[in-house]
Image (cartoon, rainbow, N blue to C red):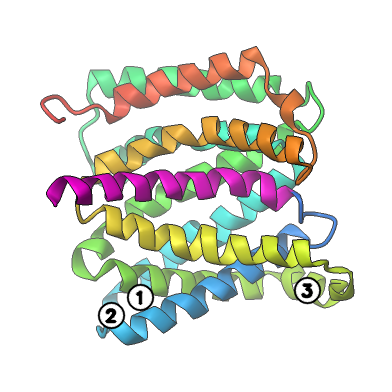
Amino acid sequence: MKNTSFLKAHIALFSVNALYGASHIIAKGVMPDFLTPSVFILFRVVGAVALFWLVKSFFIHEKIARKDLLLFAASGMFGVAVNQMCFFHGLSLSSSINAGIIMTINPILVAILSYFILKERLSVRKSVGILIGATGAILLTLTAGTGTGDSIFGDFLLFINATSYALYLVLVKPLMQRYSPLTVITYVFTFGLIYILIYPPTLTEFFATDFSAFTTEVILKIVYIVVGVTFLTYLLTVYALKFLSPSVSSSYIYLQPVLVMVFAVLFAWLGWSDDYTETITLKKILFMLIIFVGVGLVSYRKGKK
């Protein structure tokens, strides 16, 4: 029974990263032809907030302390608003392949920010890993703009997205120790929605959107991003963490660039998306492996399985 639970937990984590990997391709099928990145983010966050509050109202009944409001607000800023804005704007400019690779540098950024903010020790091994991973990321960025679908500015925004999410993971850590995960994510997304609504282009672009042009395919893709990538991935991760350690959970992010490449080929072959396979090059695969080595050195814990 225990082995079955562990297997289900691993399947859940693989499903989470498969959902994320597919979203890199699917989201580009909606932006910018039908929705601007800002409106797409609005759809995603509004849907997620509604679903999180619905589930929380049934299962979790706890209030947050007034002293934690500022930390919740900061987490909503970097974990939702800045993170999502930079991701979708960057994805609309760059290739989905680059987005998947750049996200793998997240554990390295978390280590750097934890050193400065949480005063966590930075060993020689971690320092070397940060240097190697940063080298891979820089080399990847320098190759941007050399192929169809590549963009230097798009990759820069994707890097800011990864940095913002890393900062969120550091800021939210104390909150996760004081409240249930569902309470934390519900309030974080609620604050994030407030920031997105006061971002000037959001409502302007929303009212300028031609909803009559939406096809059934576009609507299904939006539902997939809102329910699958925002809501379902969180619930699957929470389920997996009941049986597996956070380090095992975070290690699954290394699958994302591989899954993005697989979905890029598969969706292009099925005719579900534009063909981004030409952005897959040997250089990018090499730089991805360099980032993997750096992340491995940063994430490895001696004596841990």
Q: Amino acid at mark 1?
A: Leu
- Start-end of magenta stretch: 1-28
Q: Main secondary structure of the magenta part?
A: helix
Q: Position of residue 107 (x, y in %)?
A: 38, 36
Residue linked to disc 2: 64
Residue linked to disc 3: 206
| Disc ID at residue 69 | 1
| Residue lying at 17% horizontally and 45% vertically, measured from the top left | 3
Q: CA distance from mark 3 to mark 1?
A: 29 Å
| Residue lying at 76% horizontally and 68% vertically, measured from the top left | 201
Residue closer to the observer: 118 or 11: 11
Q: Is residue 304 above or below residue 246?
A: above
Residue closer to the observer: 232 or 111: 232
Marks 2 & 1, CB-CB < 8 Å contact: yes
Residue 9: say if magenta. yes
Residue closer to the observer: 220 or 209: 220
Q: Is residue 35 above or below residue 22?
A: below
**Sequence-wise, which precedes: disc 3 or disc 2?**
2
Marks 3 & 2, CB-CB < 8 Å contact: no
